[in-house]
């Protein structure tokens, strides 16, 4: 690749680094304009002379809408929601624009009270939810577009990773596995190590320096096209030098990221406490007890009851189809291991021949599963109707009854067999700290196509980072996963 080509790519990347936040600002302006127009027309219709009651100069509501819209736009921008680090991140982005909107209207209410201005309740009652809806929908659409571009190599910042070889490789793999985050691990610095690995297993990205002095590190950074420097574990650099490096990067408009040796920890669990200039990271442990446990149980019972009522026609049609396709019972009951190792009977629509369990031993050697789980893409025991209902997870619907009985949850780790639990390593047993779920992170991340280690990692992540918002997100993603039928067989 020639220098001209590199410079051209650099200029293009610098252009969108500056242009993307401006484009997001335009999208926000359109969403806010739509919200204010909706509030104006919804409350006052086409009336042109509606005025704000209580104001000394009696401003027209159209003028009020323009002023509120402008200040609202600046409020959303000041929250950092248009920052290149936030755009395209999904839930964090939606949360940021929602909170900034709520805070803004809270400010409007306080100002109205202090100035004794009577703002029409219907006007505010329409503007607030309409604004959140339009902003989140526009950001969701924009996020899809940004992530698509990032998956194709665009809209990503070049990252130089510093640390030990194993830490650099780990961080590189995480960056590359989530291109939607907008980072491209381009090169590495291994302070105090060597350019070549003694074992012969080289890094996936080029090593540009092994220096430990700030001057040498900065010289290496200046010689390459870098937007972000990520400092991982084992960097062999003293805190004072990291601070000096931060000053040098700041003068060059290069971001610095400190990546602690924490994996699979959700943002809400991380809290920073500065002590004598040292930022301490506190990691809280979620406990599914008390009010949280009550909220999850109420959510499960209400959700399962509504789903059973709405899907009752599907139950009837499926039962008739199973009976007409093969002889045997409609439902299949199987022992599974639930919370704290308690055994329960899980219900499913029968999708296999009646002697499927007896035939399992003959098919074990043909398993395409992930080591612990038995899976076959063309399992001969599956009936014609069974293949269809498994493809769209219809066979799982009777588990709603398990949810109502308190044996399962709407969202949680996959309910394992006793034979699987017997093979668990000690750390994997943490999957049993919460109730198993009809769906979960494993369901929306590939299902049967996942490796065993990845399935465990996802389940443990859920156990360690449970929240009601995450449950709602997983249920939403489940609908998409079911219709795509990816990994279902």
Image: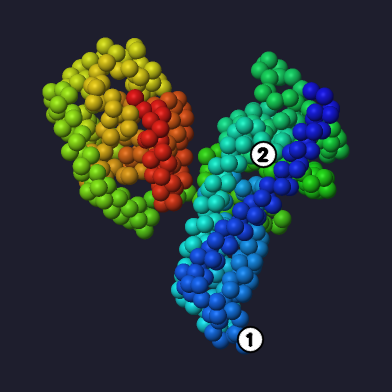
| Residue 87 position (above or below residue 481) | below
Quadrant (top left, top right, bottom left, bottom right) of the C terminus? top left
The answer to which of marks 1 and 2 sits earlier in the sequence is 1
Q: Is residue 428 visible?
A: no
Q: Which residue is mark 1?
A: 57
Q: Position of residue 256 (x, y in %)?
A: 73, 44
Q: Position of residue 395 (x, y in %)?
A: 26, 33
Depth order, front residue of 288/402: 402
Depth order, front residue of 305/18: 18
Quadrant (top left, top right, bottom left, bottom right) of the N terminus? top right
Q: Is residue 230 visible?
A: yes
Position of residue 484 in the picture relative to residue 223 (left or right): left
Position of residue 389 in the picture relative to residue 208 (left or right): left
Q: Identify which residue is drawn at 70% across, 38% down.
A: 157
Position of residue 391 in the picture relative to residue 451 (left or right): left
Q: Which residue is mark 2?
A: 155
Q: Identify which residue is drawn at 55% across, 69% down.
A: 105
Task: Tell me the crowding category of disc 2: few under 14, some 14 to 19, or many 20 or more residues within 10 angstroms, Cα based.
Answer: many
Q: Position of residue 321 (x, y in %)?
A: 18, 30
| Residue 129 position (above or below residue 469) | below
């Amino acid at each position: 690749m020639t220098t001209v080509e590199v410079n051209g790519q650099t200029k293009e990347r610098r252009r969108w680094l500056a242009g993307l936040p401006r484009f997001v600002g335009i999208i926000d302006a359109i969403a806010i304009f739509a919200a204010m127009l909706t509030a104006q027309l919804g409350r006052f219709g086409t009336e042109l002379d509606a005025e704000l009651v209580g104001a000394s100069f009696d401003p027209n509501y159209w003028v009020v809408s323009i002023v509120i819209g402008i200040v609202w736009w600046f409020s959303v921008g000041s929250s950092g929601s248009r920052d290149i680090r936030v755009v395209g991140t999904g839930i964090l982005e939606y949360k940021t624009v929602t909170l900034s909107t709520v805070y803004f209207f809270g400010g409007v209410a306080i100002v109205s009270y202090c100035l004794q201005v009577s703002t029409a309740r219907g006007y505010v009652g329409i503007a607030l939810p309409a604004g959140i809806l339009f902003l989140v929908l526009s950001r969701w659409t924009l996020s899809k577009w940004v992530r698509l571009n990032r998956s194709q190599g665009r809209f990503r910042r070049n990252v130089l990773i510093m640390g030990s070889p194993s830490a650099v490789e780990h961080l590189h793999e995480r960056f590359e596995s989530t291109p939607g985050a907008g980072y491209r691990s381009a090169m590495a610095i291994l302070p105090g190590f060597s350019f070549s690995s003694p074992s012969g297993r080289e890094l996936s990205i080029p090593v540009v320096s092994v220096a430990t002095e700030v001057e040498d590190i900065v010289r290496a950074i200046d010689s390459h096209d870098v937007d972000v420097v990520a400092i991982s574990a084992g960097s062999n650099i003293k805190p004072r030098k990291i601070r000096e490096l931060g000053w040098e990067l700041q003068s060059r408009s290069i971001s610095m990221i400190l990546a602690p040796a924490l994996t699979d920890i959700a943002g809400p669990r991380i809290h920073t406490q500065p002590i004598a200039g040292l930022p301490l990271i506190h990691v809280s442990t979620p406990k599914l007890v008390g009010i949280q446990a009550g909220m999850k149980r109420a959510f499960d019972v209400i959700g399962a009851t509504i789903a059973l009522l709405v899907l009752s026609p599907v139950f009837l049609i499926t039962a008739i189809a199973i009976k007409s396709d093969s002889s045997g019972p409609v439902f299949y009951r199987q022992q599974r291991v639930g919370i704290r190792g308690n055994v329960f009977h899980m219900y499913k629509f029968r999708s296999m021949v009646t002697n499927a369990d007896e035939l399992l031993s003959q098919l074990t050697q043909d398993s395409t599963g992930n080591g612990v789980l038995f899976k076959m893409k063309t399992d001969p025991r599956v009936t014609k109707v069974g293949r269809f209902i498994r493809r769209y997870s219809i066979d799982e619907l009777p588990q709603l009854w398990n949810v109502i009985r308190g044996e399962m949850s709407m969202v949680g780790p996959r309910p394992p067999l006793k034979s699987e639990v017997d093979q668990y390593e000690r750390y994997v047993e943490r999957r049993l700290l919460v109730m198993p779920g009809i769906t979960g992170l494993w369901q929306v991340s590939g299902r049967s196509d996942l490796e065993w280690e990845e399935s465990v990692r996802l389940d443990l992540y859920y156990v360690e980072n449970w929240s009601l918002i995450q449950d709602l997100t997983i249920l939403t993603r489940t609908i998409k996963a079911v219709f795509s039928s990816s990994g279902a067989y």
